[in-house]
Amino acid sequence: MQSKELLDDGKRQMRLCNACRYCEGYCAVWQSIEWRRDFTDNDMTYLANLCHDCRDCYHACPFTTPHEFGINPPKLFAQLREDTYRKYASPRIFAKVLGEKRSGFWITFFFGIILMVALILGTNGTSGLLEAKVGTGAFYKSMSEAVMIIAFLALGIWMVGGWLTGMSRFWKDIKSAKSEKIIGKDIVKGTKYALSLRYLGGEGAGCNYPTDEPSTIRRKFHHLVSYGFMLDLASTALGAFYAHILHIPAPYPVYHPVVLLGILGGIGIIIGTIGLLVLKAKSDPEISDEKAAKSGTSFIVALLVVAVTGMILLLARETAAMGILLAIHLGSVAALFFTAPYTKFAHFVYRYLALIRYAQEERIAHQPVEVKVGKQPVKTGTTVAGKH
Amino acid sequence: MKGDLIMETDVLVVGGGNAALAAALSARDQGVKVLVIERAPKFYRGGNSRLTRDYRVMNTRENKYMTGMYPEEEFLEDLRRVAGGEINEPIARLVVRKSEELPDWLNKQGIQWQPALSGTLHLGRTNIFQLGGGKAVMNSYYQTAKAKGVDVWYDSKLEDIEMSGTKFKAAKVRRNNRIETIKAKAIIFAAGGFEANIEWHKRYWGDAAENFIIRGTPYNQGNVLEMLLNKGASQIGEPDAFHAVAVDGRAPKFDGGIVTRLDSVPFGIVVNKNGERFYDEGEDFWPKRYAIWGGLIARQPDQVAYSIIDSQTLGKFMPSVFEPVSAGTIEELAEKLGLNPTVVAKAVEDFNNAVRPGTFNPGELDDCKTEGLKPVKSHWAVRIDKPPFYAYPLKAGITFTYLSVEVNEQARIKWKDGSLCDNMFAAGEMAAGNVLRRGYLAGFGLTMGAVLGRIAGEEAANAIQRATR
C-alpha cells in the first residue's frame, strides 16, 4: 500500500478504535488514542512505534476481516514502522539499499569480510591471516591494535551518529498538542517500560503471539536477545578497558570477566534469536506485513551471525583458523554496525523515544483533573460517554 | 426429518456464547462428556457475548479492578428499579449472590480483567471490565474448553429435538449440509434471543422493522427459542419488547457493535424526517437515557432521526466512527440530509429563541433549558448558532430481546402446565426474561448468563450422575 493510503486507512482504523476502546487495558497505544480525537500523520508514526506487535488487540477485536470494518492494527503499525526506519534515517539512499532489502546485510557482510582480510593482510601480512597465534595480544598479531581501534571507532560513530540523527528528527515529529516538557520521572518510567518490555506482558498472561493463545515466550526470547546484546556490549567495553587502560591485551582466559560476559551474551543472543525466528515462522501471516516480517528476520539473522561467529572464534582462537575466523566475525560486526541506522536494529531507538513521550502524556493524563477553560470541560468517558 | 449420523454425548450445549460456555465448562468439571454446537462459524463464535464489555457483580471485598463495594441489597434494588418493580425475587437474589464468585471463577477460565480506566469509570464500582472485551473473553472460554476436552462444533444449527414425553432424547443438527443426530443425556439451551430476526420483529412492528439496525450477531434468529415455545415451554418476558439504542444511521445492518454508538444527542437537537423535534434531548444524563432513544426513533416516520449540533459542542462527546455531515448553514445541512431546509431552519430557530441563559456543564444536570418550547429541552440547551453545523443520522439499534423460556432456580425449563423438565435446561439471553421482563442494567445480561449457565451445567451433570447411579 502507498504511504498516503496507508496513513489514511490507519486514521480510519484509529477513529474506529477510539469509538470502541475495548482494548484500552492492553497497552500504551490504546491509552494514547484516548488522549486524541483526530490523528495526524505524525500521530500515526508515534502510535506505530509505541506498538510492540503483541497482537492482543487483533485477537480481541470483533471487527477484523471478515468483518467489513477490516481492523488490523498490528499489520498497520508494522507497515508504518517500516516506513519510520526508512524515513528518519539518512542518507535516504542508504536506507533504501541497506534497509529495504534482505540482501543489504549479506552484501555488507561480504564487503566487511573483505575489508577485514585487507586490514589483516595490510598490517600483518599472510602470517596474520593464516598462522596460529597464542599468548597475550594474539588478536593483534592478526590485525594491529591501532587499525582495529580506528576501524571500529569509526563504525561505532557511524552507527550511533545514524541513530542520533534519526532520533532527533523523530522526536521533533512525534510532538503533539499533548506534549509537554519531559521531566526526569518520564525518562525513568519510559526506560522502565522499555527495559521490562512491559507491553509484551499482557497483564501477566503474556501476549497472543505466535498464536491466539496467550504466551510469555516471545518476551522471554526478546529479553535474551536484548540483554544478551547488552552483555556483549559490556564485554566489549570491559575488554577495551583492560586492553587500553590496564594494558592487558586480549585474548583472555575463559574464566576472565570479559570472556564470561561475552559467552553469556552470545548464548543469550543465539537462543533468543533462534527462538524468535521459530515463533515468527509459526505466527499468522494475516497479521503481519510481509516487508516488515522480512526486515525483522533479516535483523535477527544478522545478530545470530554475529553471535555464532563470535562463539566459533572463541572456540578456535588457538588454531590456525583464527585469522580467517577473526576476519569473518569482525566483518559481521562491521556489517551490523554499518547497517544499524537503516535496519530493524533502529526499532529500539524509536520505540524508546515513543515510550518516553508516552510516559509524559500518561503523567499529564493521570494528574488530578484541572478544568481547562475553553478546552473540553469534562473528561470524555466519565459522564458524557457511556458503555452501551 | 432423517438423521443419518449418530453421535452420543452426555451433555449437549446449544449455543456458543458466555452462558453456553459457562454451562459447558461447569458440566465438564463434573466429569461428564460435553459437546457444544455453535451455529456461527468460528470467527463469529460467541454471539452477542463477543461484543460485550463487562459483568455486573456484587462486590463486598476490596479488589483491584473495582472502585468500591456493591452490596447485595443495592444490586437487587437496582434491578427492581429498572424493571419497574417486577422481578423474580428468588432467581434475582440467587444471581446477585452467585455473581460475587464470577470474577474468580472466570479468571480461572483464563478471562482477565482490566482496572477501571477513563472509558469505564462511571461503572467502575458496580461492574468488572474484561481485558480486551467480549471477544477476548470468548477466546479464553474456548481455549479452556479445548484444554478441558469439551468438544465444539461450529457452523452447526439445531433443527429439532426428539423427546419421549417431556424428556429430551436426541437433537437433529444441520452441519455441512447434513442432518446429524446427537443423542445426549441432557441438553442445555443457551442460543440467544431473536433480535436479528427481522421477520419476527415485523410481527410487532410491521414494515418499520426493515429499518432497524441489529447491533449484534446476525446469528441470533431465535429459532431455538421458538422451537421450545412451540413444544410447550412456558413463556416469560415481554414478547414484543427489545432493548434498542440510538445508533449512527450509517452503521452496518448487523454486528456494528459498540462503535456505532453515538453520544451527540444531549448536545443539540434531534429532528425526525419531517424536520420536527419529538423528545426532550436533555432529559437526563446520556448513559441513563440512550436506551430509550432506540424506541423513540423506531416510532418516527421511516425510523430515522437526525442529531444536529454546531461547532461549539463537537468534541464534547466520545468520538464516533462516522464523520458527521457538515455545512456552513442549517439550510445547507438540511439539504445534505435530504430534509426540508425551511422546516429544519425553523426548528433550529425556534429552539434558539427558546434557550434561556444558563451555565453549560455537561458534568451535571445544568440550568441550560428552553422555555415555551414543545417538547422542552431541560438541560444542556445552548443555541445552535456557531457554524459549521454538524449532523449525525440516527437509527434504532436493536441490542437484545426479552422473550424467554421460563426456568426455575436450577435452570430447568418449565412447561406451560407448571411441571419441570428433568434433563432440559436454559440459560443466557433465552432465559434472561426470568429476572428482567423489561428494563436494562449494564452488564447484567452477562452476569445472569454466566451464573445461570454455571448452574445449568452443574445441574445437568448431576442429573446424569443421579440417573446412572
Image (tube, rainbow, N blue to C red):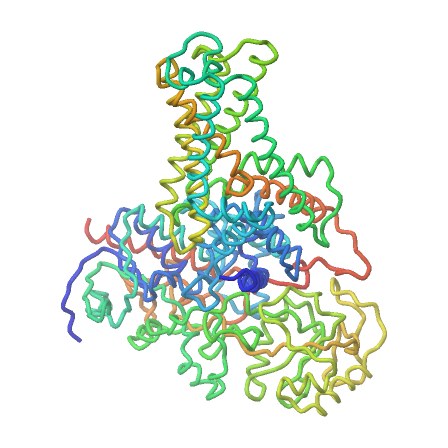
In the displayed structure, B443 sits above or below A238; it is below
Is there any visible trace of residue A253 in the rendered image?
A: yes
* Residue B416 placement: quadrant: bottom left
* Picture coordinates of residue A23, whole percent (x, y): 53, 54
Quarter of the image for residue B61 reads top right
Given residues A73 and B11, the one toward you in this image is: A73
The percent position of residue B349, horizontal first and vertical second, equals 78, 85
Q: Furthest-left residue in view?
A: B4
> Which residue is painted at 20% across and 63% down in the image?
B182
Give the quarter of the image for residue A254. Answer: top left
Report the side of B171 relative to B221 (left or right): left
Q: Is residue B404 left or right of residue A43?
A: left
Viewer-proximal residue, B372 or A7? A7
Q: Is residue A145 above or below residue A203?
A: above
Left or right of B53 on screen, residue B276: right
Quadrant housing the C terminus of chain A: bottom right
